[in-house]
Image: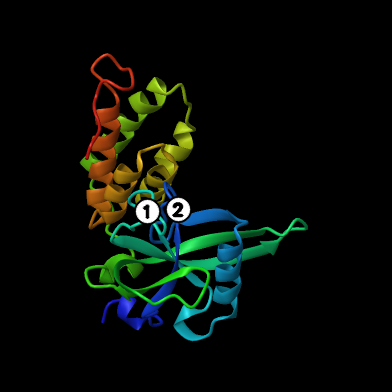
Amino acid sequence: MSESEALEPLPAAVPVFPLTGAVLFPRGVLPLNIFEPRYLAMVRDAMAATGAAHRIIGMVQPRMAGDPPPLYSVGCLGRITDYRETDDGRILIALVGVSRFRIGAELERDTLYRQVMTDYHGFADDRDEPEALDATSRASLEEALRPYLDARGLAADWEAVQSADDEALVTALSGALPFDPPEKQALLEAPTLADRAQTLCALMSFAVGPNGSLGSGGSLQ
């Protein structure tokens, strides 16, 4: 039995928070500032839910504008691990990624927010510790990061980069670097940590042209 099979069951349906550019990865952390009434209701309902749905919401990107907007087919469950209400009516939360899911049927709405059925097929390993990157992949990631940050005029704590474990580094870069929504989605949908690291390298390399400047390398679609 894998570690993931021994963990608590995952919910068959979840409320979803469609938010462009905000991608949650398994074991990653995503802070959110909630202020729209429908999502305030969603968070409060998730906190009050019982069973597998307790403290769980699904993060997913919209594909394009619309009312309601169409959604990408893959999102990630987040467990609310920090919750704070502010004096001006907002809720500040932190989500920790649990597992990716594929969106099934959307439920007929009886709430202010959207809810979908979840399909976890193909994501059973999300709750297991990932295999470490091989030395070549790790070196390639660090080598691609330096010119990308230089081209953007950004600095990095290279001691922290080099000491970070593989998953922490890949997850942090995937969430923090300013990629376009389709590129963020490609990172989310990469099957394994090694695939995600390879996609990261490709995105950074495409973004930096041969002369070391941004914009001449194209975009990975």
Q: Which mark is residue 215?
A: none
Q: Amino acid at mark 2?
A: Leu
Please name the residue shown 36% across and 38% down the image: 179
For this orientation, the residue located farthest to the right is 87
Please name the residue shown 29% across and 41% down the image: 200
Q: Is residue 10 above or below residue 159?
A: below
Residue 106 location (% of width, % of height): 34, 72
Q: Quadrant of the N terminus?
A: bottom left
Examine the image and state in which quarter residue 91 appears.
bottom right
Residue occupied by mark 1: 62
Residue at mark 2 to residue at mark 1: CA–CA distance: 6 Å
Which of the pair 38/152 is nearer the observer?
Answer: 38
Please name the residue shown 30% across and 32% down the image: 204
209 left or right of 114?
left
Residue 201 location (% of width, % of height): 26, 37
Residue 135 location (% of width, % of height): 24, 43
Examine the image and state in which quarter residue 81 appears.
bottom right
Q: Say how many tags the image has.
A: 2
What element does badge 2 sit on? loop
Residue occupied by mark 2: 19
Marks 2/1 in contact by CB < 8 Å: the verdict is: yes
Q: Is residue 97 above or below residue 157?
A: below
Tell me, yes or no, if residue 126 can be seen here. yes
Tell me, yes or no, if residue 3 can be seen here. no
